[in-house]
């Protein structure tokens, strides 16, 4: 499967999501390609750190942008079990290209007004992409969410009204273990001390994405 993790708004945790899904799938024996389609290159920097810290990554990583992302992903797809694309941060050619080849678009959304407004623009990009990729499935989920509170409920209600985008009934809570794991070149499933709740949220998200 080809999973794009994207949003036109930065700071929503798309790279964190992409690398954790990559490591999770690779740990299950899948041959995974991580595509860094974000010009900031955060996924590539993480992969370099992981290689330095652990000696190997467990997955293959490549940076692709613009039209090359679409062309190369199509060519590489038969060689891998899963391809995960980290893309966006703004409306770019790379994001638009990813939407034409992805099976699923995961849209991390923080429960904040600016984040909700940005997803309205993503829904327009999804509608355009479906003219080329009619089977594209777009799923928004709350990421770096509050552990409790009305903001989560309000955000879900707002996302549920978006045309063409599924609002997932799951959320990934803002937890230190995600950031601490990344700082060590690891995914949250590898981090010690083990954060069972964070792992459970990741497993649930992966099941949603790859179902």
Image (cartoon, grey):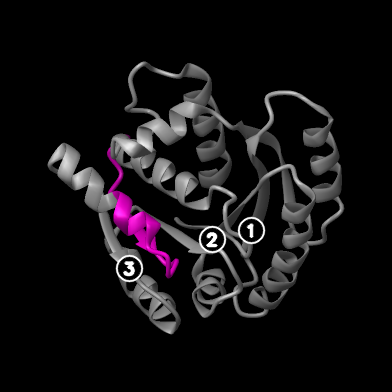
Q: Residue at x 36, y 72 (%)?
A: 64
Calculate the distance from the C-alpha at mark 1 to the C-alpha at mark 2.
6 Å
Residue highlighted by disc 2: 103
Neighbourhood count class around disc 3 (C-alpha, 10 Å): few under 14, some 14–19, many 20 upward: some
Query: The C terminus lies in which quarter of the figure?
Result: top right
Q: Disc 3 to disc 2, how far (Cα)? A: 19 Å
Secondary structure of the residue carrying tag 1 is strand
Give the percent coordinates (x, y) of residue 100: 55, 74
- Quadrant, the N terminus: bottom left
**Residue visible at 34% across and 38% down in the picture:** 183
Q: Are marks 1 and 2 in contact (CB under 8 Å)?
A: yes
Task: State which region is magenta.
Answer: 28-46
* Disc 3 from disc 1: Cα separation: 24 Å
Count of marks placed on residues: 3
Of mark 3 and mark 1, the one earlier in the sequence is: 3
Residue at which label 3 appears = 63
- Please name whichever residue, 186 or 98, is drawn nearer the observer in this view of the structure: 186
The quadrant in which residue 137 appears is: bottom right
């Amino acid at each position: 499967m080809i999973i794009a993790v994207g949003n036109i708004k930065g700071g929503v945790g798309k790279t964190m999501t992409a690398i954790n899904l990559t490591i999770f799938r690779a740990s299950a024996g899948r041959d995974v390609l991580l595509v860094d389609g974000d010009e900031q290159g955060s996924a590539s920097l993480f992969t370099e750190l992981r290689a330095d810290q652990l000696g190997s990554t467990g997955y293959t990583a490549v940076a692709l942008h613009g039209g090359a992302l679409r062309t190369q992903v199509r060519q590489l797809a038969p060689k891998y079990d899963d391809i995960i694309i980290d893309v966006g941060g703004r409306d770019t050619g790379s994001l638009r290209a990813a939407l034409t080849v992805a099976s699923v678009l995961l849209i991390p959304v923080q429960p904040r007004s600016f984040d909700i407004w940005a997803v309205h623009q993503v829904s327009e990009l999804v509608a355009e992409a479906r003219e080329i990729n009619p089977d594209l499935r777009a799923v928004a989920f709350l990421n770096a969410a509050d552990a409790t509170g009305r903001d989560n409920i309000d955000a879900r209600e707002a996302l549920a009204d978006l045309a063409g985008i599924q609002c997932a009934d799951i959320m990934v809570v803002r937890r230190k273990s995600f950031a601490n794991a990344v700082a060590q070149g690891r995914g949250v499933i590898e981090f010690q001390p083990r954060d069972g709740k964070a792992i459970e949220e990741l497993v649930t998200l992966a099941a949603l994405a790859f179902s």
